[in-house]
Amino acid sequence: MALSVRVIPCLDVADGRVVKGVNFQNLRDAGDPVELAKRYFEQGADELTFLDVTATVDNRSTTYDVVRATAEQVFIPLTVGGGIRSVEDVSRLQANGADKVGVNSAAIARPALIAEIADRFGSQVLVLSLDVKRSERTESGFVVTTHGGRTETDLDALDWARQAIELGVGELLVNSIDADGTKAGFDLELIRIMRELSTVPVIASGGAGAVEHFPPAIAAGADAVLAASVFHNGELTIGQVKAAIAAEGMPVRA
């Protein structure tokens, strides 16, 4: 493995506050996003991801404020997702300090959005956020969901990932709704099959609960590992996770 594995804290933001739940349900307050972002930067996070989980016109200005304030405090790549529907949204987020953007529901509704963003800004700024559930309705056994996992689409997760890569996404953020918030470990099967089909980096998300959960996700094919509640609650630090990864002979940034 030539490139260092990235460790990425995720901040799910609603109305200017970080929230966290289990399986995307029963969200509770987890702190101030700027303070948490600064803490993770100081701990050695490689990147940060902000997901606006209630992205509407009403609170979009709040997201811009949070992104701008965070970009002034931390100096690592910042990915922002939630409610991005146009190249103009991407331009505004970049103007406020975002390095990359994540698309999900709007891209499902109109796949051409992926090509429009990639053509204007480059694939390197575009992350496809995949909220995936196990399902017997699809050939692969995994279905794409929207609205925080509450609404199942008719899209096979693997088919959609392939299409999005062809349209120009630069990374796949693969979040297991089944594992999200459970702290029972990443969905290794899901990571493995996404790695097999993907020609772009794969970020594994959903289920991290202990340091020993991270190396298997990387062994399954993740280029980066993302977690939320274990960092927000102070159960783990970025340093502890990196030490566990390094102990397995996998490259991480010091």
Image (cartoon, helix red, strand yellow):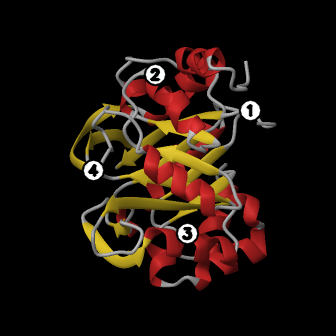
The local secondary structure at tag 3 comes to: helix
Q: Residue at x 51, y 29 (%)?
A: 214
Image location (x, y in percent) of residue 116: 68, 80
The amino acid sitting under disc 4 is: Phe
> Who comes first in sequence, dot 1 or dot 4?
1
The amino acid sitting under disc 2 is: Glu
Question: Tag 2: Cα neighbours inside 10 Å, few (<14), some, or many (≥20)?
Answer: few
Q: Measured along the vertical axis of the image, is residue 248 above or below residue 7?
A: above
Q: Please tell me whether mark 2 or mark 1 is closer to you in this view.
A: 2
The local secondary structure at tag 2 comes to: helix
Image location (x, y in percent) of residue 64: 53, 53
Image location (x, y in percent) of residue 223: 65, 43
Q: Which residue is mark 2?
A: 212
Q: Residue at x 62, y 28 (%)?
A: 45
Q: Measured along the vertical axis of the image, is residue 190 above or below residue 113?
A: above
Q: Which residue is mark 3?
A: 161
The amino acid sitting under disc 3 is: Ala
Q: Measured along the vertical axis of the image, is residue 183 above or below residue 150?
A: above
Spatial separation of the CA atoms under disc 2 and disc 4:
23 Å
Spatial separation of the CA atoms under disc 4 and disc 3:
21 Å
Circles 2, 4 touching at the beta carbon (< 8 Å): no
> Who comes first in sequence, dot 2 or dot 4?
4
Query: Hey, which residue is sitting farthest right in the picture?
Result: 2
Q: Please tell me whether mark 2 or mark 4 is closer to you in this view.
A: 2
Q: Please tell me whether mark 1 or mark 4 is closer to you in this view.
A: 1
Q: Which residue is mark 4?
A: 24
The amino acid sitting under disc 1 is: Ser
Question: Tag 3: Cα neighbours inside 10 Å, few (<14), some, or many (≥20)?
Answer: many
> Who comes first in sequence, dot 3 or dot 1?
1
Q: Residue at x 51, y 45 (%)?
A: 204
